[in-house]
Image (cartoon, grey):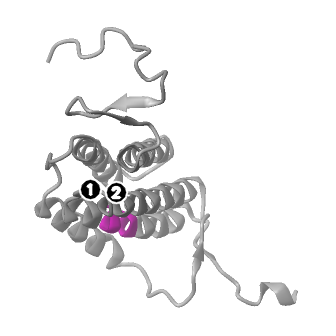
Amino acid sequence: MGNRLSKIYTRTGDDGTTGLGDGTRVAKDSARVCAYGTVDEANSCIGLLLAAAVPDDMRALLTSVQHQLFDLGGELCIPGHAAIQAADIDRLEQHLDRYNADLPALRDFILPGGGEAAARCHVARTVVRRAEREAVTLSHHDAVRPEAIRYLNRLSDLLFVLSRVLARHSGEGEVLWNHEHRKH
């Protein structure tokens, strides 16, 4: 692959529009741009998570997820393009089941925290949830493949489970919500 970007600034977006992958120009605040922009933000959050201490097997998984999120961003940026497949969702579910198998059942809500890596994972999870909401919003205006939405839904579930694993791995443990906190 040759040079794709020889110049970083083009000035073509100075009017508040941006080019989609198919060459169409749309407003920078369009539902499509918000959806793939939030997927990009989620990918950056996972990169920030990977800058923390993370077990090697989880690091490999999250790096693979970053590649898939880049593909998903492309799918959302190019109307009619398909990048995420049912097999990608199945793989997320397999990882989710594997990591969740050793965790105790949830009896309380968990607050974001539990060490640096766990907290970063919670941030990534919430941004993925927002990306999912943005993709659903886009689907009200334009075609969005159900695989894209399902992938984001499953990924946020996986990140929740990984945050639990990371909290335990850090030695700090999970931060449980105390519903009686106001009584103190």
Secondary structure that dominates the magenta span:
helix
Rendered view: 128 above or below 50: below
Q: Residue 18: where, in percent of width, then height?
A: 38, 30
Residue that numbered label 1 is attached to? 142
User: Which residue is at the front of the view, 79 or 114?
Assistant: 79
Mark 1, secondary structure of its residue: loop
In front: 24, or 145? 24
Magenta segment includes 90: no
Viewport quadrant of the N terminus: top left
Mark 2 and 1 residues: CB-CB less than 8 Å, in contact?
yes
**Amino acid at the residue labelled 1:** Asp
Task: Decide: is 117 above or below 172.
Answer: above
**Which residue in the structure is indicated by mark 2?**
138
Relative side of 4 to 121, left or right: left
- Give the residue displayed 23% in from the left and 33% down from the top: 21
Q: CA distance from mark 2 to mark 1?
A: 6 Å
Depth check: 78 or 73 in front? Answer: 78
Tell me what residue is drawn at x 39 percent, y 65 percent. 156
Q: Provide residue 58's location: percent of width, then percent of height.
A: 34, 55
Q: Residue at x 53, y 90 (%)?
A: 107
Q: State the mark number for residue 1.
A: none
For this view, does 154 lie left or right of residue 181?
A: left
- The image quarter containing residue 8 is top left
Secondary structure beneath dot 2 equals helix
The quadrant the C terminus occupies is bottom right
Q: Residue furthest top?
A: 6
Identify which amino acid the numbered label 2 is placed on.
Leu
Dot 1 crowding, Cα within 10 Å, few <14, some 14–19, many 20+: some
Q: Nearer the viewer, residue 13 or 118?
A: 13
The magenta segment: 152-158
